[in-house]
Image (spheres, rainbow, N blue to C red):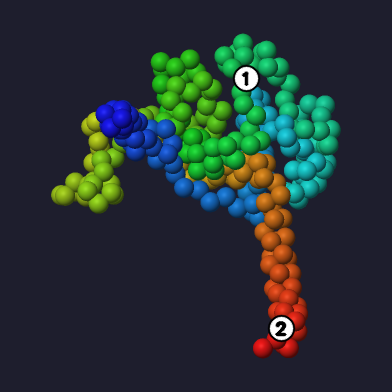
């Protein structure tokens, strides 16, 4: 029995080691992002980016245009004029005209619905994924991704981001930060990790900060779509806490009344 336990324990060690080495976003660590469901201008820009660049292939089929218009403070007619490009009505679901059969023929698999993508993957993962495309001539669509290796979709935001190339990752110092040259102070590359970060080619697309802002707005919108009630849940939570505080006063007084004659 002891031998069996030893064998089982030893066989699990490689799995534990692999789990410890696994990064939070594929081959890299996820970038942290804090979404804000109360930032309506950001959500409006994210909705526009989603419709213009993502909905050609992806859907948000659990969300309706009308609900988005109401929550984001967009007039219905403005939605009809700028966010709906087919015969859909304001009360319809956010779907596209691509059939699953055509999608499988063109992409090998039907593009996933994005309504719950941030609930399934997390906002950090989605944000990092959209920032991690790079040129790869060996891939059918000419791009690859640090977060999702050998990704099967084209880079939908390529027009905005511009050209990007994969560069060696920065070397990690003993304190966990980026290792720097002791003379120049410049960060040093890790020769063992030849493709660990994406570098934007100057003069193509938006600047890094501008593109990061676009990706933030899109991630913020996808987080809203995945949990639209979150916009109101914080306010409801405050009312609930206030009610409980008032209720506690009456419960305390009632409890004191019950026990006042008991010694």
Q: Helix, strand, or loop for circle 2?
A: helix
Whether residue 108 is visible, yes or no, is yes
* Percent x, y of residue 48: 67, 39
Q: Nearer the viewer, residue 173 or 208?
A: 173
Q: Is residue 176 left or right of residue 149?
A: left
Q: Nearer the viewer, mark 1 or mark 2?
A: 2
Mark 2 neighbour class, 10 Å CA radius: few under 14, some 14 to 19, many 20 or more: few
> Residue 11's quadrant in the figure?
top left
* Location of residue 101 with respect to 13 vertically, above or below: above
* Location of residue 237 with respect to 102 vertically, above or below: below
> Residue 123's quadrant in the figure?
top right
Kindly identify which residue carries mark 1.
110
**Residue under the image location 60 percent in, 40 percent down:** 119
Q: Is residue 244 left or right of residue 223?
A: right
Could you tell me which quadrant the N terminus lies in? top left
Whether residue 202 is visible, yes or no, is no
Inter-mark Cα distance, 1 to 2: 67 Å
**Residue under the image location 81 percent in, 29 percent down:** 88
Could you tell me which quadrant the C terminus lies in? bottom right
Decide: marks 1, 2 in contact (CB < 8 A)? no
* Percent x, y of residue 196: 34, 33
**Residue under the image location 71 percent in, 49 percent down:** 229
* Location of residue 74 with respect to 51 vertically, above or below: below
Q: Residue furthest top?
A: 105
Q: Helix, strand, or loop for circle 1?
A: loop
> Residue 258's quadrant in the figure?
bottom right
Kindly identify which residue carries mark 2.
259
């Amino acid at each position: 029995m002891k031998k069996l336990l030893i064998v089982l324990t030893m066989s699990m060690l490689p799995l534990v080691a692999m789990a410890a080495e696994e990064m939070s976003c594929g081959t890299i660590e996820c970038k942290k992002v804090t979404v804000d469901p109360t930032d309506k201008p950001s959500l409006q820009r994210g909705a526009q980016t989603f419709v213009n660049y993502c909905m050609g292939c992806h859907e948000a089929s659990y969300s309706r245009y009308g609900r988005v218009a109401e929550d984001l403070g967009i007039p219905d007619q403005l939605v009809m004029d700028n966010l709906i490009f087919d015969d859909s009505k304001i009360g319809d679901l956010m779907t596209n005209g691509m059939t699953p059969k055509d999608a499988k023929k063109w992409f090998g698999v039907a593009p996933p619905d994005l309504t719950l993508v941030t609930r399934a993957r997390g906002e950090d993962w989605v944000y990092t994924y959209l920032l991690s495309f790079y040129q790869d001539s060996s891939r059918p669509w000419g791009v690859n991704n640090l977060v999702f290796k050998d990704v099967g979709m084209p880079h939908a935001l390529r027009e905005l981001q511009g050209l990007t190339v994969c560069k060696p990752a920065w070397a990690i110092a003993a304190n966990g930060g980026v290792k720097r040259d002791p003379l120049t102070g410049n960060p040093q590359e890790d020769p063992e990790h030849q493709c660990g970060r994406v570098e934007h080619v100057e003069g193509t697309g938006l600047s890094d900060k501008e593109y990061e802002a676009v990706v933030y707005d899109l991630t913020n919108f996808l987080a809203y779509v995945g949990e639209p009630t979150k916009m109101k849940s914080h306010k409801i939570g405050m009312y609930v806490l206030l009610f409980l505080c008032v209720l506690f006063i009456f419960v305390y007084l009632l409890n004191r009344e019950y026990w006042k004659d008991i010694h």
